[in-house]
Amino acid sequence: MTKDWINVAAVGAGRIFQDAHRKAYTNAASTNYVVIALCDIRKDLVEDQLKALKKEYDRLLGKAKKKEKGAQVERLKFGLDHLKAFTDFGKMLDAVEGNCDLVDNCTPGRTHVPLSVQAMEHGYHAMAEKPPGMNWWDVKRLVDAERRTGKCFQLNENVCYERPVQAMRRVIAEGHLGAVVEIDVHFGHGGPYVPYHFSEAGLPHFIDPLWSGGGCLQDLAPHGISRAFWPVGPGARVVSCTTKLLERRQSPRVMSGKPFDNKLDDYAEADLEMWDPRTKRPFSMKVTTSWCGGFAFPFSIEGERGTMSIGQDPVKKAYTPVIFADEGDEYFPLDEDDWDLLDSHAREVQVYCDNLLHGRPSNTPAEYALRLQECISIQYYSKLAKRKVAAEEMEKWAEGIAAGHPSYQDGVDEIARALTGAVDQKSPDSG
């Protein structure tokens, strides 16, 4: 591994790469990694993005030379000397052997797990965008791959790397909130854009059950849940769930001005029962997710000593964790670090690469990806069963399905078909 920086090979040159990851790779604070390879099945797309990345690296190299920053000059020159485009993922993994440390997976949801596992088995660390996978049965492979290969995985759930969210985790760990009692999450927007990748069914990958694994729960719930669930700390998990609504309110769904037949959920409400290993106590989590518009109130975490959210400190004017309590509101300072103050997409890569350089795992490892996906999948399973369900029951149900399929992926697909088939048309009394 490179002494001063991490060499990255990225797969998937679509919107999430263009709008978030490429900007992260050229962020002024991104001094501990450099891209050396980029892959996409579309030759025109990958070459266009490679050209844009080289242009940015040339600009940054010029600045580094003027400021006589020798280490950054060396890093950027290394990237420019090695940067190549590929249209075959396996060939890219072979070509970068000896130079690559980390594979960045920016592909659609269906390939988040398989390509990340392939990268780890090839000897590289990996990271992938949300959703964690098609369902929790899919994501279990990431946990297994970390154990077998000794490589690290990171779920690129960028809200976990927002400075106020990271500070909330510290505040809870230090006991300022006491035991968590209830989390209330509301997260939504008007729906996804039309992506570059369309499935074999002719659908944008966001709304094809075998490419997304679900609708708004797969697309948005990772953000909404993580902002309040991740701060609780490592090992927190779902125990049971009662899904109140899992609906398809808009079909056709208009994406980037174009209508598409939508079979998936765009509105969901569920009550989850959780377990906190830190306090050895249960807590509840109410989750509302929507592709039918946003909410004014994003989340709250109620504890024994008050209710925590994020608010603007009236003195320092920064947005920080705040605990609202009868005896008065308390604002907590943000953690200081060397990474970008505001761009959470850049921060997630900067923090991960710093961890790797110092022999530490990710802050959002495969275990967190699995616990998060369980919170999502169990909402589908409860609706499928039409009652309250336990996590252990969902596990046994999946074991029965997987036993009837020759390959693990076939089992994942069959589970996805069953879970997404639980979605209702809009109920007569829903808003």
Image (cartoon, grey):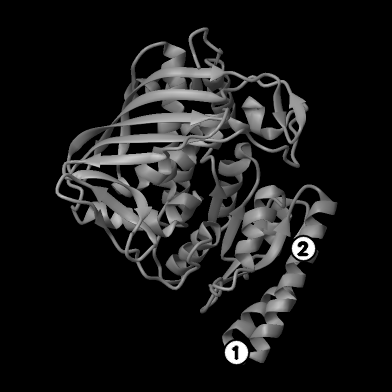
**Secondary structure beneath label 1:** helix
**Residue 61 falls in image quadrant:** bottom right
Three-letter amino acid code at disc 2? Leu
Please tell me how many numbered marks the rendered image carries: 2
Viewer can see residue 134: no
* Type of amino acid at the residue the image marks with label 1: Gly
Residue nearer the viewer, 328 or 178: 328
**What is the quadrant of residue 166 in the picture?**
bottom left
The residue carrying mark 2 is: 50
Residue 324 placement, left or right of 320: left
Between 8 and 162, the one lying in front of the other is 162
Query: Which residue corresponds to mark 1?
Result: 70
The image shows residue 199 at horizontal and vertical percentages of 73, 31
Residue in the image at 35% along x and 66% along y: 316
The outermost residue toward the left is 327
Q: Which secondary structure lies at badge 2?
A: helix
